[in-house]
Amino acid sequence: MDLGIRGRTAIVCASSRGLGRGSALALAEAGCDLVVNGRDVKALATTAAEIRERFGVTVTEVVGDVSEPKVQAELLSAAPTPDILINNNGGPPRRDFRELTRQNILDGVVQNMITPIELIRGLVDGMAERRFGRIVNITSLSVYTPIPGLDVSSGARAGLTAFLAGVARTVASRNVTINNLLPGRIDTERLWGGVPKGSSKDAYREQLLVDIPAKRLGTTEEFGHVCAFLCSIHAGYLTGQNIPVDGGRYNSAF
Ligand SMILES: NC(=O)c1ccc[n+]([C@@H]2O[C@H](COP(=O)([O-])OP(=O)(O)OC[C@H]3O[C@@H](n4cnc5c(N)ncnc54)[C@H](OP(=O)(O)O)[C@@H]3O)[C@@H](O)[C@H]2O)c1
């Protein structure tokens, strides 16, 4: 399917590895020029080079922590009139909520709620004026299904979801959509960071698959292609939604 976004410009936050990288690759495959981001210079350069070589699009690298206002300003100046924004970031560390300091909680809220809101605020009016905008926030299945130990992540992302539910309706008439993708157990480095002490990767995989109806982990390619579809011209009537990409793990009829 031609996604109809060839020549569009996309800012993809936290995109040197994992879900962000998968989304960047799928958007480049659809013909988008990209601004990519990550804190590790080498990892970002490797991903950017691969995208240029495979898809021949323009890729601008912005190194740094996307939660920092300076880095956000660099992202926006690298693409002053972007058509697409993919909000992504690292997730807070897994920790019992009793052990969290006030600062830990504030950092998580900045990372997974305030940062995407700030970026959207910086570019949504321009998208509305130009009558095209696609914003996808990579949140988590934990918005729907509690994951003990990831309470800051769940709370901050649920806050983001509620905050943007109203915003999405204010820009829909100008062909700007805002949707959330909820990953559940996609095969990335972060996922394997959860292997319990004393357990093996294989044993952990078995444990992870128990409640996934698809009986496998998702891939970053699958995730990226769902993301690119949400950014396509075909998804213009789809806004304010939460879409799990989880192999059916979210066990609900609605
Ligand atoms: N994988 C899953 O199944 C799953 C499920 C639910 C939620 N999520 C959430 O989805 C997001 C992405 O997860 P992932 O699995 O793709 O993780 P990952 O494999 O660890 O990749 C994270 C990417 O984000 C970059 N990054 C991290 N912190 C950053 C920061 N402060 N500023 C800029 N870039 C940053 C990393 O590069 P640098 O380290 O070089 O900065 C890397 O490119 C996370 O918030 C995670 O909690 C993932």
Image (cartoon, rainbow, N blue to C red):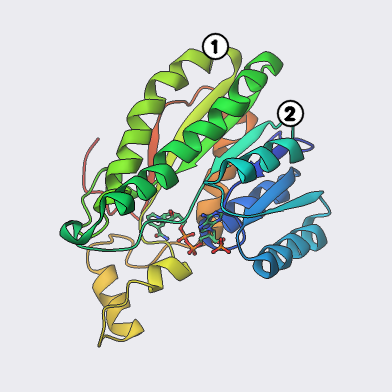
Give the answer, above or below, for where 211 lies relative to 205: above
Residue 135 drawn at (x, y percent): 55, 33
Task: Between residue 145 and residue 156, name the one nearer to us.
Answer: 156
Label 1, label 2: how many angstroms apart (C-alpha)?
19 Å
Whether residue 242 sits left or right of residue 77 in the image: it is left
Q: Secondary structure at mark 2?
A: loop
Position of 36 relative to 116 (above/below): below
**For the point 35% across and 83% down, which residue is it?**
201
Q: Position of residue 117 (x, y in %)?
A: 48, 32
N-terminal of the pair, mark 1 or mark 2, is 2
**Which residue is at the front of the view, 162 or 244?**
162
Q: Do residues under tags 1 and 2 come within 8 Å of each other at their CB atoms?
A: no
What residue is rendered at 72% in x and 49% in y?
28
At label 2, the amino acid type is: Thr
Q: Amino acid at mark 1?
A: Ser
Let me know if residue 1 appears in the view: no
Query: In which image quadrant can residue 191 be found?
Result: bottom left
Question: At which x and y percent is residue 163?
Answer: 37, 27
* Residue 81, label in figure: 2
At 44% from the left and 20% from the top, the residue drawn is: 167
Q: Is residue 129 left or right of residue 188?
A: right
Tell whether 197 sits left or right of 175: left
User: Dot 1 corresponds to which residue?
Assistant: 173
